[in-house]
């Protein structure tokens, strides 16, 4: 049976330009797709834009534009970032697209007919910016006003609304998480959801509004528009053709037993994906995701990024100044998925110089320089009979790291994957210093020198292959210099030491140049 994986990013809210958090979620998902392909998986990668709601309607009105024009322009900004980052989606959903809207209406009608929806009056506190409901108990009180958890002022709402009967699935959801305790990664996020929301009792969810019209109309009652979470969450299925004429992708990448279905989200929307989404899928009698990967925020030393603090990081600025490889690598190398990560300009420069310029880039340059100097660019044939202890040690390190990397990929820990790769890279640079090939040349130890050159050439190949899902431009350049651009590398031959026998490499030029930190 073939291995398949369906990976999604969050359906990003189209209320403003993309920021570094959007970049991280997408780079993380894109790199997992690349590594899963290495392991032989057939992959499908989906992203999208959540384009409805009062916040967008208000912003569009404030600048005298229609909501559709507003979200079109925001979508263009996101697309610009994805192109600069080199993240290519297989499917991209916009919730304002007609096919998505029609499916959401069908789903609403099905819920309505199945008695999972009822009409009532919604009253309470509401954050327009976060599109989230609050009670007096969880609102933050300050100077006689009420605020959401991130500091936006709450408004009082009182309007007719349809409600989704989440509460009737309380016991089912509790049992679901008993059966699947590793559904949410990391498990600490599940503990938070259980303690803060499930244990208190799941409340029915207001799913329509009547005070604005920028949304999907309810067929059963046209004065209502469907509120954000049914609309946005259904994108994961509508992008596959669910309830549409061509549902082949849905059948292959969701309604199948041999596929991993993985959602990647920021921790602030984990509750909606960990409570609303499983219950919605249960109501539809549709298969569940296999995992929900919930990563932390990217913050600075001043705390959470905000315009008022002047600490907002523009991903496009960093790409334009330092290249997309630098940003992709830094985010994936230094930020794990279990806690908040700190973005520091100094750390960004230091990580780039240490890992990419001094370690990886320098090793490729040294290897090619020695091959061109000592053997006219020809990689000697691998000869196991002349290996000494230093040779065997570096070969064993490369061989043993293979299973470690596979395990980290399958656990979606890309920062650990990169840590293993950089450790091998450091050992390989030390191998050069310990072996002293210049001494082997002067002592005319040809067999020893040839063995050494074969090993470093193949280590260069292994490192470049393993880094390719993250470093798009640098590894492409390295493969060209190693004359491996047209070689069919895979997760097996990339770890072998005889695949470059008698290959003529090309001359080298710097893969990554050190950055002087002047900011």
Image (spheres, grey):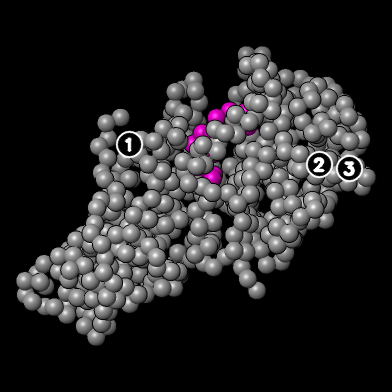
Q: Determine the residue positioned at 37% across, 55% down.
A: 476
Q: Secondary structure at mark 2?
A: helix
Q: CA distance from mark 3 to mark 1?
A: 54 Å
Name above or below for residue 128 compared with residue 360.
above
* 3 vs 1, front mark: 3
Nearer to the camera, 393 or 380: 380
* C-beta proximity under 8 Å, tags 2 and 3: no
Name above or below for residue 119 compared with residue 253.
above
In the image, the segment drawn in magenta is 14-26
181 sits left or right of 465 in the view: right
- Local crowd at mark 1 within 10 Å, few (<14), some, or many (≥20)? few
Q: Position of residue 121 (x, y in %)?
A: 88, 27
Q: Which residue is mark 3?
A: 109
Mark linked to residue 361: none
Q: Which residue is mark 1?
A: 346
Q: Earlier in the sequence, mark 3 or mark 1?
A: 3
472 sits left or right of 516 in the view: right
Q: Earlier in the sequence, mark 1 or mark 2?
A: 2
Q: Secondary structure at mark 1?
A: helix
| Image quadrant assignment for residue 416 | bottom left
* 2 vs 3, front mark: 2
């Amino acid at each position: 049976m073939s291995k398949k994986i369906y990976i999604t990013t969050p359906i990003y809210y189209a209320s403003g330009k993309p920021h570094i958090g959007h970049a991280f979620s997408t780079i993380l998902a894109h790199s997992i797709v690349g590594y899963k392909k290495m392991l032989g998986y057939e992959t499908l990668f989906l992203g999208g834009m959540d384009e409805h709601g009062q916040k967008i309607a208000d912003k569009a009105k404030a600048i005298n534009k229609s909501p559709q024009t507003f979200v079109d322009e925001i979508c263009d900004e996101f697309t610009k970032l994805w192109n600069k980052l080199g993240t290519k989606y297989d499917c991209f959903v916009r919730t304002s697209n007609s096919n998505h809207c029609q499916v959401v209406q069908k789903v609403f009608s099905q819920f309505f007919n199945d008695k999972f929806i009822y009409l009532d009056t919604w009253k309470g506190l509401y954050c327009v910016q976060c599109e989230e409901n609050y009670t007096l108990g969880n609102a933050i009180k300050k100077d006689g006003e009420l605020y959401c958890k991130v500091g936006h002022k709450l408004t009082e709402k009182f309007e007719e609304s349809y409600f989704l009967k989440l509460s009737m699935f309380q016991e089912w959801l509790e049992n679901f998480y008993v059966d699947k305790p590793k559904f949410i990664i990391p498990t600490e996020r599940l503990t938070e959801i259980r303690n803060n929301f499930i244990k208190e009792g799941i409340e029915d969810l207001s799913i329509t509004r009547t005070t604005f019209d920028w949304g999907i109309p309810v067929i059963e009652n046209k004065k209502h528009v469907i509120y954000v979470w049914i609309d946005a969450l259904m994108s994961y299925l509508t992008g596959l053709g669910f309830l549409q004429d061509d549902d082949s992708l849905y059948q292959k990448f969701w309604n199948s037993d041999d596929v991993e279905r993985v959602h990647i989200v920021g921790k602030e929307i984990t509750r909606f994906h960990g409570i609303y989404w499983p219950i919605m899928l249960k109501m539809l009698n549709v298969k569940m995701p296999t995992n929900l990967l919930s990563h932390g925020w990217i913050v600075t030393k001043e705390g959470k990024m905000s315009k008022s603090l002047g600490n907002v990081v523009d991903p496009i600025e960093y790409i334009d100044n330092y290249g997309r490889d630098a940003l992709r690598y830094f985010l994936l190398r230094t930020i794990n998925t279990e806690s908040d990560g700190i973005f520091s300009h100094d750390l960004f420069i230091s990580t780039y110089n240490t890992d990419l310029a001094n370690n990886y880039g320098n090793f490729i340059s040294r290897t090619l320089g020695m091959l061109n100097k000592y053997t006219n660019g020809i990689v000697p044939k691998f000869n196991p009979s002349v290996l000494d202890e230093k040779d065997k040690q570096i070969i064993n390190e490369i061989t043993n790291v293979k299973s470690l990397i596979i395990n980290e990929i399958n656990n979606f820990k890309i920062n650990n994957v990169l840590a293993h790769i950089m450790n091998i890279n450091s050992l390989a640079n030390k191998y050069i210093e310990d072996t002293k090939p210049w001494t082997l040349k002067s002592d005319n130890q040809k067999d020893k020198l040839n063995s050494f050159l074969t090993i470093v050439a193949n280590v260069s190949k292994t490192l470049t292959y393993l880094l390719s899902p993250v470093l798009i431009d640098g590894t492409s350049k390295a493969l060209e210099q190693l004359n491996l651009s047209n070689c069919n590398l895979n997760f097996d031959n990339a770890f072998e030491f005889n695949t470059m026998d008698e290959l003529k490499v090309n001359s080298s030029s710097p893969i990554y140049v050190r950055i002087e930190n002047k900011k």
